[in-house]
Amino acid sequence: MKSSLVKTDTCRAVYFNEYNKIVQISNREIDRKELFAWFEIEDVMGLLDGSLKLSDYVIKRTSNPLVFEIVKSKVDIKRRSKNNQLYKIERIDSPDIMISMKNDILSISCSDELKDKLELNEGQDITVAGKSHHVFFVTHKDRPDFLIQTITVPFSELLTTGKNVKVEYNKYNVSVYTQKYFDNYSWR
């Protein structure tokens, strides 16, 4: 919704404060301290009839200093889902991170190739993407919503010695999910 440069019969004055919040909409110019811009009535009809909330919108100056536009004050992008947040670890060849289960011990380790490439030593503080720990989710087989156990492994341990964790659940009925920090993970 962009403002008009000139007032027409079908325009309304949209008044806004120093925080760019809309405070009033009028069909005429009122002697007020706030700034205002002229908008076509069809552009602001939702604000006038109450189908849109005034508090959800602000006035913003465009690249043309004489033209304003009404934009949403908050934009909520809901992109989080299990598809882009959780990665199911499957069996692949030549992984960076290997996860295996023998009896009731889950072993999480780094490949020798990755260790050689990173040249890390035990005891170093290691962060990856701003995080100091890698989280793994042990779930019922192919059910990321059925959480059995959460395993948190410091990157300093994962990338040097690896970690063994006792999991008390049938090893044939579990899957492991994680947020992906490395290129390849493998479940063996």
Image (cartoon, helix red, strand yellow):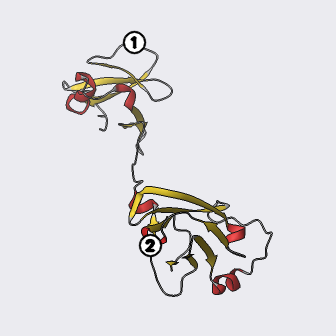
Quarter of the rendering containing residue 8: top left
Nearest the camera: 100 or 98? 100
- Indicate the quadrant where residue 149 lies: bottom right
Residue at 46% from the left image edge and 80% from the top image edge: 91
Task: Please provide percent x and percent y for residue 61.
Answer: 43, 38
Q: Position of residue 168 (x, y in %)?
A: 55, 63
Residue sitting at x 57%, y 70%: 104
Residue 29 higher or lower than 127, as above or below: above
Amino acid type at mark 1: Asp
The image quadrant where one finds the N terminus is top left
Please determine whether, in this image, residue 148 is positioned above or below residue 89: above
Q: Nearer the viewer, residue 99 or 2?
A: 99
Residue 169 at x, y = what percent? 50, 64
Please state which amino acid type lies under the numbered disc 2: Tyr
Provide the secondary structure element on which disc 2 rests.
Answer: helix
Circles 1 and 2 in contact, beta carbons < 8 Å:
no
User: What is the CA distance from the residue labelled 1 to the residue labelled 2?
Assistant: 76 Å
Which residue is labeled 1 in the image? 31
**Helix, strand or loop at mark 1:** loop
Q: Where residue 172 is drawn, which disc sits there?
A: 2
Residue furthest to the right: 123
Residue 82: quarter of image: bottom left
Residue 167 left/right relative to 52: right
First in sequence: mark 1 vs mark 2: 1
Nearest the camera: 57 or 187?
A: 187
Name the residue: 65% across, 70% down: 164
Say the numbered circle drawn on residue 187. none
Q: Relative to 18, is 50 on the left or the right?
A: left
Q: Residues within 10 Å of mark 2 (few under 14, many from 20)?
A: few
Horizontal placement of 150 versus 27: left or right? right
Residue 95: x and y in percent read: 54, 82
